[in-house]
Structure formats: C-alpha cells, structure tokens
Image (cartoon, grey):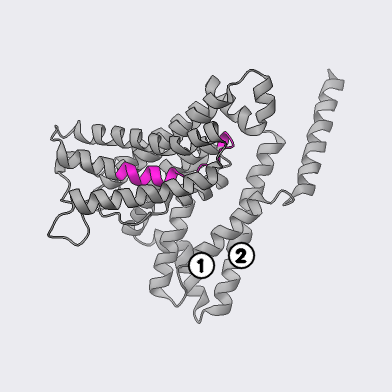
Amino acid sequence: MNSTTKLNILRTVMAILIALGISFLIILIVSDEPITAITKLMFGPLQKSRYFGNVIESMIPLIFTGVGVCIMFSANQINLAGEGAFHIGGLVASVIALNFAMPAGLHPVVCILLAGLAGSLITLIPAIMNVKTTANELVSSLMVNYLVLYFSNFILMKILRDPKTGAGSYVLPDSANLFTLFSGTRIHVGLVIALLVALFGYWFLYKTKIGYELRLTGENENFAKYSGVSIVKVILISQLVGGFIAGIGGGVEILSPIYDRFTWTALLGYGWDAIIISTLAKKNPLYVPFSAFFLAYLRVGASIMSRATDVSVEIVSIIQGVIILLIVAEQFLSKYRYKMIAKEAKNNLNIKEAK
C-alpha cells in the first residue's frame, strides 16, 4: 500500500470521525436525552433484523448510482444526469413490465437491460452537448434531470396511471418482480446484481485499456491527448457506461419488493447521493458498497433516532456535509501527507543503497 492510498484511507476515516464528533456535540446541546439519541443513531440498526434489513435494502440503489458516478467522474466529467438515468430506468422497466408479457425468468432481465439503455441515452445527452458545443456538462445535466422528471410524469399520468390510484401506475406483474433473498425482509436479488456491478466497475476502470485512458484523461486531459488518447471517445464511453449502470439501478429498484407499481413523481435523490458515495470511495467502484453501506446505516439509524427521541433525522445531513468538506479539502492532513511521502522516499533510497 503506497503513501497516497494510506493517506486517502486516513483522510476518510478522520473525516468520518470528526463529522460524527460534531454531530454528537450538537445532539448533546439540543437534546434532552442525548445518550439515548446517540445510542439509537449508532446502534439502532443492529437492534432488530428488520432494521438491519432496511440498511441493506437502502444501500442497493446507492451502489448502482455510486458506481455509475465513479466511472463518469473518473473522466473528469461532472455529469449529474445519473439522477435522471436512474429515474428513466425505473420508468422504462415499468413500461416494459406492464406492456410485454414474458416468462418469469426472462421478464426482469429484459426490463432491467432496457432500463440501462435508457439511462445511457440520458447521460449521453450532456456528453454530446459538451463535445459538440462545449456546453458545460454540469448545467446541461441538471436541466436533463428535470426534463426526464416531467417526461416521466407525463407518461405516468397519461399512459400508465391506474384510475383507482392517485398517482401510480397499474400493478407491475409478478413475472417481472425480483425475488427476495431472505424471508422476513425485502432484501432482494438486486443486492447480488449491485455487487457484481461494483466488481465490473473496478475491472472496467483498473483492468482495461479504455479504463486506463479514462482515468488518465481525468487526471490530465492534455497529457492524455498528447499520448494519443481520443478524448471524445473517452468522454462518450464513460458517460454511456455510467448512465447504463445508473439506469439498471432504476430498473432494479422499481422491480424490487419495495414497490408494486411505478409511483415516482419526484426525483428520488439517488443521483445526488451518488456524489457522496463516489467521494467517500475516492472514485473507486470497489469501495462503493462500503460507502453505500455506511450512508444507508447512518440514515436508518437517524430514522430510528428521530422516532425514539427529540432529535431530527436531518442530523445525517450535517454528518454528510462535514465529511464531504473534509475529504475534498486539499489542505486537510497535508502536513502528514508530506511526511509520508518523505518517509517513503527515504525508505526507497535506503533499499537502493542496500542493493
């Protein structure tokens, strides 16, 4: 493990500990029962198997969008359309599930794959705009998300809506549903798919030529260009793959036991959460499941805490904000970084002299 990896791990751990410390201090100040609140926040999800099941259920969509954003951000493309890709993935999976009858084993596979293709098209729009018109992908991707939302609401209300419900589609057929892995919970086969996607993301970024070119472009676009890397190709592929994964996530989520019909009339926020996940994972898909578990655990713990005590669930937002600020702050632990680099250089020099 080199000094950079050690520093990244140390920075992340320290950021989490500091954020938790600040949150505990706030709880001590505002709560009439601070010990109970902190206990519920930290250990509430472990008190019942149902609560821990909620953590696993919550982390599944976070893994999909987290891996997708890792791939897109690794090319230094701040494309936020992963939110729209996830949303359109859920819509397309619902449309296919409701309108095309297929055998139980094949039905969800087709729905999820088409959801991924729809997600790719959504993230491709800001990428093409960036390549062809130099439009800022941050701004264009934000706009695309709302286009997706309003388009989805139109399809839901005019085509898919069940007249017996206020704003929901007809019930999705059983043949398209993903089965649960553990009885008594809603943990479904999507967990296995999500973990496989994280492994694929790592293989794609770190074990393939295009993944190397993608990361090289993200670190230094000019150097990549002079090295013969096609920047346009890298940008388009990174957005296509990232959007495909986010779209799959939307399809998996809507076909899970958590939903029985399409009811998404607002953006769910998984694309925004993916930025936190990617930051914690340092854009490495292999670490995304751990980051997703941490965030899901905190949120379930905060929900339990808010129901049992006088502390609001918004305490998680404070923790998230402090963690992000500390991780992205270049000067955080900078002195320690210089010491680690100097120590590693000295050790390498001693080894060479010994030889």
SS under mark 2: helix
- Please say if 328 is above or below 316: above
The numbered mark at residue 183 is none
- Identity of the amino acid at label 2? Gly
Query: In which quadrant is the N terminus drawn?
Result: top right
Residue under the point 47% across and 32% down:
201
Looking at the picture, how far across and down is residue 295, in whole percent? 48, 54
**Residue that label 2 marks:** 21
Task: Determine if the magenta segment contains residue 88.
Answer: yes
Residue under the point 30% across and 54% down:
264
- Of residues 201 and 269, the one drawn nearer to the viewer in this rendering: 269
Q: CA distance from mark 2 to mark 1?
A: 12 Å
- Please say if 313 is above or below 131: below
Q: Dot 2, how many residues are within 10 Å of its Cα: few (below 14), some (14-19), or many (20+)?
A: few
The tag earlier along the polypeptide, 2 or 1, is: 2
- Please say if 192 is above or below 265: above
The numbered mark at residue 315 is 1
Q: Quadrant of residue 194?
A: top left
